[in-house]
Image (spheres, rainbow, N blue to C red):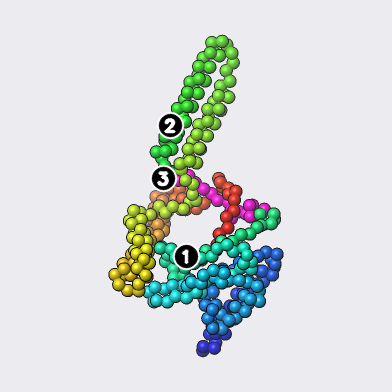
Amino acid sequence: MFICLVLNRLLISDDVFENILAWRERYNMCECIIAGDFNVDLDSPDPVAKNLIKRVRDNSLVRCDDLYQKVPTYVNNALGHSSCIDYILVSSPSSVHDFAVLDPDIKFSDHLPLKVALSGSFSDNVKSNISTSKSDVSELYLRWDKADLASFYAYTDSQFSVLCNTLEEILVNFDDTKNKGVKFDAAFYIDTLYDAVVNILCAGANAYASRAKKNFYKFWWSEELDLLKQESIDSNKLWKAAGKPRSGPIFTKRQSSRLLYRKRLRDEQKAEIYSYSNDLHEALLKKDTVNFWKCWRSKRTSNKCTVRSTAVLITL
């Protein structure tokens, strides 16, 4: 049975690596980055590890953890287990400027996130494809519920005060031209004032109101979740400062805070789904098409794009 399991793991790892290398051969003019959970410690005597290490060397790939400090990437504090099974491989080690295994205070996975800083360049064709890709087109909305309204009101008040003075001058000019029998170009001044009002409102919105995609902010987020999150962060920092004990009141407090915060998150996320479904159901029962489609659009993005991205940021 053990031999069969080892053979199956070898076959699976071979198959995955062959697929990756096929893509690399297809784009052999490009540098290669492979990142993920390998599910095996590459420094162990495991047959799968030995096989992967051979493939890594044969294809001139370099492990980022070999360039920097090696630390566990999988940590299960409850079981007291830790190992290094997550890796980032690169074909150009000179392009790697930094590599680290992060340990955030809030995380719900036993796998720690990896961070790598790389330098590189794109050909003109690649740049063109990225800039015109539909995946880079984002629809953003002004979030007035998150805006600094006091500053927005103060800004627009000061700007509109100046505009009111301009309007008074236009009215005086209108009276003078009327008395003199000269034609007054009202359409020009109306368009000018209209543009000024729009520009003031847009400038104020850009300065004091954030833009975000639909559902970027969690409407179900509450002050209770803020407190639970902060308590989880504080208890985790205290646990780290105490040397990461595996038992005792500090460890118990950390675990209970994390579990409670995670449970409340799940409860609120479920409530969001039920609330959305219930609102749609109620609108259907009442044959209220206006509220039905309003609720539907609140969770669905349209095809119309109001803001297009002008830059591309690639992160790992």
Q: Nearer the viewer, residue 39 or 248?
A: 248
Q: Which amino acid type corresponds to the residue marked 3 in the rendered image?
A: Asp
Residue 36 seen in this snapshot:
no
* Helix, strand or loop at mark 3: helix
- Give the quarter of the figure containing the C terminus: bottom right
Residue bearing mark 3? 145
Earlier residue among tags 1 and 3: 1
Write the residue at 43% across / 43% down: 147
Give the left or right position of residue 302, taking residue 25 as reference: left
CA–CA distance in space, label 2 to label 3: 20 Å
Q: Could you say which disc has been placed on residue 157 in the image?
A: 2
Residue 305 seen in this snapshot:
yes
10, above or below 270, in the image: below
> Which residue occupies the extreme top position in the image?
180
Task: Identify the magenta region.
Answer: 128-143
Q: Residues within 10 Å of mark 2 (few under 14, many from 20)?
A: few
Q: Could you say which disc has been placed on residue 102 in the image?
A: 1
- Picture coordinates of residue 58 (x, y %)? 66, 76
Earlier residue among tags 2 and 1: 1
265, above or below 20, in the image: above
The answer to which quarter of the image holds residue 231 is: bottom left
Between tags 2 and 3, which lies in front? 2
CA–CA distance in space, label 1 to label 3: 33 Å
Write the residue at 32% across / 74% down: 247
